[in-house]
């Protein structure tokens, strides 16, 4: 049956008797960095309690990067970490708890869900589903989670996050976003997506020196183009199209887009550039594969003091939000106000959980001459 024939009034009803009522709006919780860790790695696991409060999201990874022999240990490790770590996960903690389950065609995914939901469903905020192909994948997880939540007596639904890692997933991105009230957001999965598209890159995220635009050749004295002359080149972003499409689909459905992994841990400069591109396009956060990337993500996905000063000045100057004003020689109108309110609201959300940002934003003065 096509999804368009489903009654709108049924969309927000529980899919199982006793399951929690689906959310009508996904909460805007700060998630600048989603930090991945291996729950089967004792050294990594021992650092988790100290990371609570320093990163917006801690994600126990059960899928890629976890060897087949370690799948059960990772699952059991995540249960132990969730139960033993104070202030991790749930609605009140400073750091959310997410997990990435194994792919839906794997031999481990069913045990992932039937183990995690009863054991730590009350602390688990979001389940990340890899290699999502279409709405049917989300709807399968949706129904199964409802049954498990009902059996476990959970009072709030666990949200679902999809990773775009296949060409089919990108082609179906709008229907994936609208497949369930559980949908929290989408992440770009560049490595698997590159392989599925047969892209000729072995990099995990980021640009590629071969994907470029070259400056036009200069003219020689006789007016001929000198194609062998030195010319500037400008490296392009392989992922711009996909991120922009993902952002639009998420905005349409009221959920949140994220950049995925940046694999070159040592190149913190290029990492920051890539994160900033995603932030400017509309992403709310990114993945972190190493603790040094957390600081980069927290900085990039937090509006600067200068941006918030300008945004607050526009909000103050616009009054009821209609008409137009001149501010520092530039025209600001109702469209400008909407842009600025996005920044102001984000700053308020971040200041609520980040004491350092709260201190910085509190020093902002909006005194200025309007006209």
Image: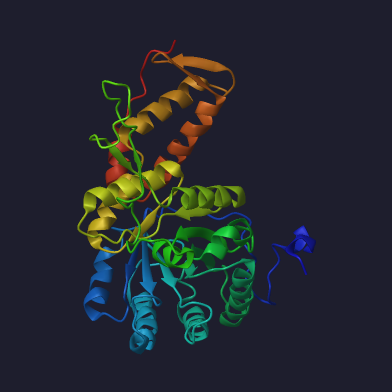
Residue 174 x %, y % = 61, 56
Question: Going 48% across and 63% down the picture, which residue do you hit?
Answer: 197
In the displayed structure image, the side of residue 76 where residue 43 appears, left or right? left
Quarter of the figure with the C terminus? top left
Q: Is residue 331 positioned above or below 157 on the image?
A: above
Residue 66 x %, y % = 34, 79
Near-viewer residue (308 or 112): 112
Q: Is residue 107 positioned above or below 18 on the image?
A: below
Which quadrant holds residue 143? bottom right
- Residue ranking furthest to the front: 222
Quarter of the figure with the N terminus? bottom right
The answer to whether one can see residue 90 in this image is: no
In the displayed structure image, the side of residue 46 where residue 247 appears, left or right? right
Question: Going 45% across and 43% down the picture, which residue do you hit?
Answer: 281
Near-viewer residue (184 or 199): 199
Question: Going 28% across and 40% down the picture, which residue do you hit?
Answer: 359
The answer to whether one can see residue 290 in this image is: yes
Q: Is residue 84 positioned above or below 36 on the image?
A: below
Residue 190 x %, y % = 41, 61
Which quadrant holds residue 286? bottom left
């Amino acid at each position: 049956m096509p999804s368009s024939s489903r009654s709108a009034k049924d969309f927000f009803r529980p899919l199982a008797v006793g399951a929690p009522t689906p959310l009508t709006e996904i909460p805007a919780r700060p998630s600048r960095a989603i930090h991945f860790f291996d729950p089967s790695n004792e050294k990594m696991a021992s650092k988790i309690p100290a990371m609570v409060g320093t990163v917006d999201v801690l994600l126990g990874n059960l899928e890629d990067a976890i060897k087949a022999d370690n799948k059960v240990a990772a699952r059991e490790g995540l249960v132990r970490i969730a139960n033993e770590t104070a202030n991790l996960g749930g609605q009140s903690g400073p750091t959310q708890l997410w997990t990435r389950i194994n792919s839906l065609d794997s031999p481990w995914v069913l045990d992932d869900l039937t183990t995690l939901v009863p054991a730590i469903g009350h602390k688990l905020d979001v389940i990340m589903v890899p290699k999502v192909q279409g709405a049917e994948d989300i709807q399968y997880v949706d129904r199964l989670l409802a049954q498990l939540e009902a059996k476990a007596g959970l009072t709030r639904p666990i949200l679902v996050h999809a990773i775009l890692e296949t060409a089919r997933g990108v082609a179906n991105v709008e229907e994936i976003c609208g497949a369930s009230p559980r949908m929290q957001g989408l992440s770009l999965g560049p490595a698997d997506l590159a392989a599925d598209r047969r892209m000729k890159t072995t990099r995990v995220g980021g640009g590629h020196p071969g994907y470029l635009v070259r400056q036009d050749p200069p003219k020689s004295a006789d007016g001929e183009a000198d194609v062998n002359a030195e010319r500037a080149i400008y490296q392009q972003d392989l992922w711009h199209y996909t991120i922009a499409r993902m952002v639009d689909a998420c905005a349409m459905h009221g959920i949140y887009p994220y950049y995925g992994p940046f694999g070159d841990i040592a190149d913190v400069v290029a990492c920051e550039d890539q994160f900033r591109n995603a932030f400017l396009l509309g992403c709310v956060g990114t993945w972190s594969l190493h603790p040094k990337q957390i600081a980069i993500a927290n900085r990039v996905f937090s509006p600067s003091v200068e941006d918030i000063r300008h945004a607050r000045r526009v909000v103050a100057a616009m009054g009821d939000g209609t008409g137009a004003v001149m501010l520092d020689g530039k025209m600001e109108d109702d469209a400008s106000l909407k842009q600025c309110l996005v920044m102001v609201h984000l700053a308020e959300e971040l200041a609520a959980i980040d004491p350092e940002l709260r201190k910085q934003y509190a020093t902002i003065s909006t005194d200025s001459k309007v006209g």
